[in-house]
Image (cartoon, helix red, strand yellow):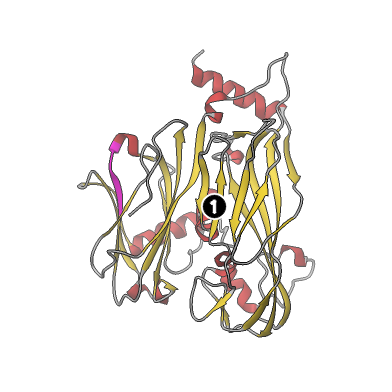
Amino acid sequence: MTPSEQNLLMRQLLIRNSPLINKKLPTVTGAYGGTTRVKLNNTGLLTRLFAHIKLPYNASVAPTSIGNKSVFAAVPKVQLIDFDGSTRINTSAYLLQVINSMRQRGSAMLTANLQSLAGWTSVSAGESNDFREPAISLATGAQTLEFILEIPIAAHVERGDLRGMINAQFTSGDLQLAVDFASLLNGTTDDDFVFNGGTMTLGTPSIDVYQEYYLPQAIQGVLPLPQEDLATVYEIGVFSRTTDNLAAGQEKLLNFPVIREVNAVALDFINNKLLGAGAAANDLSQFVVYANGNNILYQASRTFQCHKQRYALAQDLPQGTYALDFSKGPISTAIFGNVQLAVVPQGTLTTPAVEVCFESIYAKGSTLSGAPV
């Protein structure tokens, strides 16, 4: 039996004979403008985390509208580092939700900025307020922003793909989830904030983390541990925000991470402080993936890219937000070498910026990637 065959056998034995446990950790409080760290339990084979985030505030003057990043603008960075120093998650909450949308082939965005404009004032018969998530209000008074982030560790538990699981059964060493909170919730016509306008006093944010893990059960005295899955890193990261070399009609090159199988790229384009400047005429116009400078692996106009996203999600992502999906044929930078994504802005540009992150898989011990430039 080859190592890969043995891994598949151990994986199936694990799935069939071991409980998949979901356990709530103690509530952790933080502070706006700071980093809050949640220590995970050293138990089992970790597959996924869920972070239930609550952000209290008191609005003495009501905000006028909700930014296009909605509640996710309140968390500019989410990070998870493995025991051995491998980066598992390093991106913004907004782009994490974009990746999760493509992973689930559904709207993890939850059309937050559309639903919440109604103020969540009406609830259908039989519908519980608990399911109005993310909950946003434009009213004055004491309010709480509340939403849940899914933080995948294994590649895809629902599909039985456990590559990237973390063996947390250690007696020493800490595994921590780090969440950065924005300094403010409201700004002035700026999608880096949850709200536009208003006057607010901020309270104390908190996080409830739910830890999902398999608890291996011995079979004839042997624990089913899929070693190849545990020696693989599933990563949503290499996050960057870049402002240089962005000019209308000119290609801006973003480097793929090296020695990776890249499943997806999530990015957003900010122009005049708004996603896509609020208009297609001032958004990105072209997307091209090059291998070694001249071989085209993927090419799409903005219209075609939006069509592919709508086909996958049955709805659009917010303006200026894009997800390039390569899950049916991952791009291996170990094979193709230097791989770059070129995006082309168009129209009138005012302090433009691109935020990007990559969903990828690699074997532990591979050369670590550099940040895109």
Is residue 63 highlighted in magenta? no
Q: Residues within 10 Å of mark 1 (few under 14, many from 20)?
A: some
| Horizontal side, residue 134 vs residue 332: left or right | right
115 up-or-down from 62: above or below: above
- Provide residue 103's location: percent of width, then percent of height: 52, 48
Q: Nearer the viewer, residue 208 or 130?
A: 208
Q: Secondary structure at mark 1?
A: helix
When asked about the image quadrant of residue 163, the answer is top right
| Horizontal side, residue 132 vs residue 322: left or right | right
- Provide residue 238's location: percent of width, then percent of height: 43, 49
- Residue type marked 1: Asn
Q: Which residues are magenta?
A: 336-341
When asked about the image quadrant of residue 251, the answer is bottom left
Q: Nearer the viewer, residue 195 or 13?
A: 195
| Horizontal side, residue 322 vs residue 198: left or right | left
Q: Is residue 329 visible?
A: no
Q: Which residue is mark 1?
A: 100
Q: Quadrant of the C terminus?
A: bottom left
